[in-house]
Image (cartoon, rainbow, N blue to C red):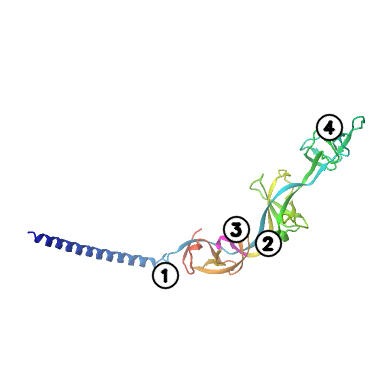
Amino acid sequence: MKKSIPSAIVTAVIIGLILTFVGLGINTYLLRGRSTQEGTAGGGPGGGRNGRNAITVRVTPVVQDTIENSVRLNGDVLAVNQVAIYPTVAGKITRTFFQVGDSVNRGQVVARVDPSRPGEVYTESPVVSTIGGYVLSTPVLVGDTVSTQTPVITVGDLSSLVIETFVPERFSNAARRGLAAQVFLEALPGEIFAAEVEEVSPVLDPASRTLRIRLRFTGGRDERIKAGMFASVSLVTNTRRNVPVIRRESAINTYGSWIVFTVNERNIVSRREVSLGLENEEFIEVISGLEIGDVVVSAGQNFLTDGDPVRIVE
């Protein structure tokens, strides 16, 4: 009895191994049959060329359009004519006739100064505005002593406003009179105001290496725009008209070269190397490599290779 026990164990182990190998063989056979069926299905509709699955992409056509290159600058809205009014004699301010925001006519008396001194009595001297406009500031009060170098009141002609800004040296050659621009005001979000360069300084500031320019609004007077407002100016530095353009995201930079993928009528992509020109926030000019009407992949191209099938979605 003691010798028959090891024999029974060995027999059970052998039978177990045989059943295991049989099970593995059946499982392998079933998996191969399933793979063959899937491969056959992949070669049918939707399977793609050489069994490759179609990649989902979005496309846009190459169109002919005008493209502008611009630079964004910060500036301030100023009154065209802003003048500080000074007294003709030194003395003490006895009366003021206007407050900030009041309208003043040219030649109107805005204050009076008493030039009298101890032992000497003189007639009050009027302070006369040299321009018409609105009172922007009144830096003195009644009782203050002023000299002929002390501004009594500041008057600005607000009927015409300008935007003053400073152009960096690298863009200074593009700044010229008549150059179009768009103005965005912090106080009026979402609105765009048309402007053009009216004045260009003949020299650069040696400290900041910038060129001072002034722009005027071309869309007419808007009462909501006030002197002193902060402005953001988009200055057009270059313009190309009637050129092929594509969306910026369509182009991929690969080892210093720009490439795009075009799609033919069979939804197969081709890799194209292109030369690019001017660009803005949305579009970029195509100098060579594409023709107007070509269909270009604008989304999903990062996973493509030449000859891949694609599925186009809107």
Query: Which of the two labelled residues, at mark 2 and mark 4, occupies the earlier sequence position?
Result: 4
Please give the range of residues in magenta. 244-250
Q: Is residue 94 magenta?
A: no
**Image mark for residue 50:** 1
Spatial CA distance of label 1 from label 2 is: 46 Å
Residue displayed at 71% across by 58% down: 169
Q: Is residue 248 magenta?
A: yes
Assess disc 3: are there few (<14), some (14-19) or many (≥20) residues with their C-alpha within 10 Å of its C-alpha: few
Residue 284 sits in quarter? bottom right
Query: Which of the two labelled residues, at mark 1 and mark 2, occupies the earlier sequence position?
Result: 1
Q: Which residue is mark 3?
A: 282
Q: Secondary structure at mark 4?
A: strand
Residue 11 sits in quarter? bottom left
Q: Quadrant of the N terminus?
A: bottom left
Residue most extreme to the front: 118
Q: Amino acid at mark 3?
A: Glu
- Dot in front, 2 or 4: 4
**Image mark for residue 95:** 4
Q: Which residue is mark 2?
A: 239
- Dot in front, 1 or 4: 4
How far across and how far down the image is residue 299, in percent? 52, 60
Q: Secondary structure at mark 2?
A: strand
Residue 137 sits in quarter? top right
Spatial CA distance of label 4 from label 3 is: 60 Å
Q: Amino acid at mark 2?
A: Thr
Query: Which of the two labelled residues, at mark 4 and mark 3, occupies the earlier sequence position?
Result: 4
How far across and how far down the image is residue 127, in percent? 86, 37
How far across and how far down the image is residue 88, in percent? 88, 39
